[in-house]
Image (tube, rainbow, N blue to C red):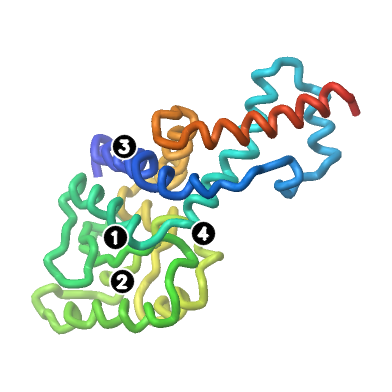
Amino acid sequence: MTEQQKQAIIESGKQYFRSIIIPNHLKNLNKLHLSSFDINPFLINYLAAFIKEDSQIIGLAKALVYPHIFDKVIDASNEQDVQSLVSLLQEVTGGASNFDGIDFEFVDAVDGRRKFCQFKAEVKTINKDDIASVLCHFKPLISQPSLDLQFEDLVVGVLYGEKDNLSDYYKAIATHYPVLCGSDFWQHLTGEKNFYARLLKAMGEVLDEGDFDGSELIQKPVEEIAEEIRQICARGI
């Protein structure tokens, strides 16, 4: 895959995050405090002792709030939302499939073989009934001798998350077909080991850009956390 295609995927990911995911889910963002985060109180006091400028306070607040928001947004993603990203990927790569139930086709950058992929949002997104559905969608392809399929050519692509956190339902599917999760999937698609990290970083930058509906909902908790840190700085250790 060319760097131009990779950049197009990143821009598509940012657009998906900006226009669909954030507006849909940040409306329900709960009010955050320092106590909302699992951090050592001695550590926050230690860090506060070295903060000399207000911009550093804002930076520390963002470092706490942004990952929290990102995790909440991804956890709230549903399969309908993911189909929007799938459509963008199909447009960028020309990977739309003619087979019912198959979301995407691509040439694996790792082994060079053509893959037939069903997309899922993240590591907890499916239930027990989805196992049979996934397996059923692969069956018609197995009976196509012209495809010259191997076991590794029918895959489930999990767009976000870590392999170690896959639910038992995904693990059940993995006894039949490979489940490529997070960085593993994106490496097979792009050939770049760190592409997933690049994509997440780019999506995170959308939060900083603030050019989306609901940006004020993010700035509010950042300012509230920053104010709590200012109070710690004023008290000293």
Percent position of residue 25, x then y: 46, 49
Closer-to-camera residue (198/21):
21
Choose the circle earlier in sequence order: 1 or 3: 3
Q: Residue at x 25, y 75 (%)?
A: 150
State which tag comes first along the sequence, 4 or 2.
Answer: 2
Q: Mark 4 touching mark 1, by CB under 8 A?
A: no
In space, the residues marked 4 and 1 are separated at their CA atoms by 22 Å
Under mark 2, the amino acid is Glu
What residue is at 39 percent from the left and 43 percent from the top? 17
> To which quarter of the image does residue 236 belong?
top right
* Labels 1 & 2 near each other (Cβ < 8 A): yes
Q: Residues within 10 Å of mark 2 (few under 14, many from 20)?
A: some
Towards the viewer: 77 or 50: 77
User: Where is mark 2, residue-wise?
Assistant: 152
**Foreground mark, 4 or 2?**
4
Q: Secondary structure at mark 3?
A: helix
**Count of numbered circles on the image:** 4
Residue 121 screen position, x and y as percent:
40, 60
* Mark closest to the chain's N terminus, 3 or 2: 3
The residue pinned by badge 4 equals: 162
Q: Which residue is mark 3?
A: 11
Q: Secondary structure at mark 4?
A: loop
Q: Residues within 10 Å of mark 4 (few under 14, many from 20)?
A: some
Q: From this view, report whether residue 152 is shown above or below residue 112.
A: below
Look at the numbered disc 2 and give the secondary structure of its residue. Answer: helix
- Residue type at mark 4 is Glu
The residue type indicated by label 1 comes to Asp
Q: Which residue is mark 1?
A: 111
